[in-house]
Image (cartoon, coloured by chain):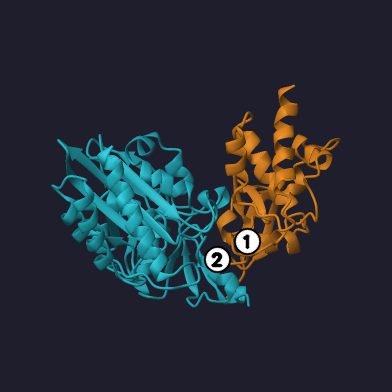
Amino acid sequence: MTKSEVSFKVNGTPRRLEVFPMARLLDVLREQLQLTGTKEGCGEGECGACTVIVDGRILNSCLVPVAQVHGSEIKTIEAVAGDAQLHAVQQSFIEHGGAQCGICTPGMVLAAVDLLERNPQPTESDIRTALAGNLCRCTGYMKIFESVIRAVDNSRR
Amino acid sequence: MRSFVPNYQLTTPGSLADVLSLLANEPGVWKPFAGGTDLMVLLEAGKLTHRNYINLWPLAELRGIEPTDTHVTLGALTTYTDVLENQILRREFPMLCQAASETGGLAIQNRGTLGGNIVNASPAADSPPALLAYDAEVELVSTQGSRRLPYQDFHTGYKQMLMRPDELLTRIRLPRNTTGATHYYRKVGTRKAQAISKVCFAAIGRSNDGHIEDVRMAVGSVAPIVVRCVQTEAAIKGQKPDDTTVKSAQASLLREISPIDDIRSTANYRLRVASNLLADFLATLRS
């Protein structure tokens, strides 16, 4: 089979690549664009470690062939922090022990950032639903959950 | 081991007409590829045997949820998130919304499609029980024209369906006849989120003057296909939702389903749970 050209924007930068169309978006991000903040956990859509935001929606980049993001805008964990400061969710993860081994963290942070963009004042139940697709093998779920709650509380002040 | 990606083709046609020509001109060579939430799992596992796929994702012609006075028509690429964001579906087809909210996590719901859920033909799929209980129809289109058939006739055996290689499932149509009905949907899995069902039960019914009418029910993960339980419906229809009806309906259900032991559950557990959910549905009709 032959490679074909795919264009999309990643973190605001236009990219044009020659790729095998069935290549996983996850692999293209990590191996061709050196965006290694996006992690591979299970590789089958169960764990959420490879979460990215495409056209304003979170998805599992292990389940998306790169041909399907032609023309899309992609946001990865690398673009969550501003130039000078971390995103409130990231800051809260640091302050409240939301990160342990770190493999699930980029996906957890993106899932939380996506929730707050859709719903700046989520209930505890909204937070649980938003994080339901992300697994933590360190099982630090309560710290992660509390980190998101504190990020929401901080934004209320 | 992961499949070798260069072995696969994923072509992106410009229109639905182009997709249909490709399917017609080289029958069996091309298969449609929607949100990828099932096929990419097979790719990763090295089990994706077919090689050539048509990327449907950019086709606007396969999107949209359109109501008329009598039906709601959903494009095959309607995602679970699209379902959850639609007010008519929330109001009139709550079981479909519940199925959508209990399918994977948000990242899967943003990507998985109803058409894909149907054509992937897993007996454990979450939306088919609701679609069957709502008497859905599916629309199949080819270069020869289009046809509609009742969804309950579509699946004929494990991963078998009444669809020619040159046809594409384009739409799902739901009759808007649910006003005032009781909707009962329960997915039973190992955990609340991100689980594949052990048993998935969907039923709709009405009671009139103490008697049950208009009952329709379907159960997933209990047979090679998701089963519309017509014999059990017949055992319930016109009866009072009392203990006698519960017993005869349960006896009928146990004849109509044929669960197996597998990685997720056992045949015995599934029979017991399906039977209990039926009793719970009938209790809901009573109250």
Determine whether the residue tagged by mark 2 lies in a helix, strand or loop: helix
Q: Would you say B174 lies left or right of B1 here?
A: left
Q: Report which colour depicts chain B.
A: cyan
Name the kind of residue labelled 1 in the image.
Cys
Quadrant in which the N terminus of chain B is drawn: bottom right
Q: Nearer the viewer, residue B35 or B51?
A: B35
Q: Report which colour depicts chain A.
A: orange
Residue furthest to the right in view is: A84
Label placed on residue B40: 2
Quadrant in which the C terminus of chain B is drawn: top left
Q: Nearer the viewer, residue B32 or A39?
A: A39
Q: Which residue is drawn at 30% across and 51% down?
A: B279
Label 2: chain? B
Q: Would you say B248 lies left or right of A122 here?
A: left
For disc 1, the marked residue is A62
Label 1: chain? A
Are dots 2 and 1 in contact, CB under 8 Å? yes
Q: Which residue is drawn at 20% across and 39% down?
A: B207
Name the kind of residue labelled 2 in the image.
Met
Distance between mark 2 and mark 1 Cα atoms: 8 Å
Determine whether the residue tagged by mark 1 lies in a helix, strand or loop: helix
Establish if B105 lies above or below A63: above
Q: Which of B205 and A49 is in front in this view?
A: B205
Label placed on residue B87: none
Residue A111 shows in the view: yes
Q: Residue at x 71, y 38 (%)?
A: A148
Q: Residues within 10 Å of mark 1 (few under 14, many from 20)?
A: many
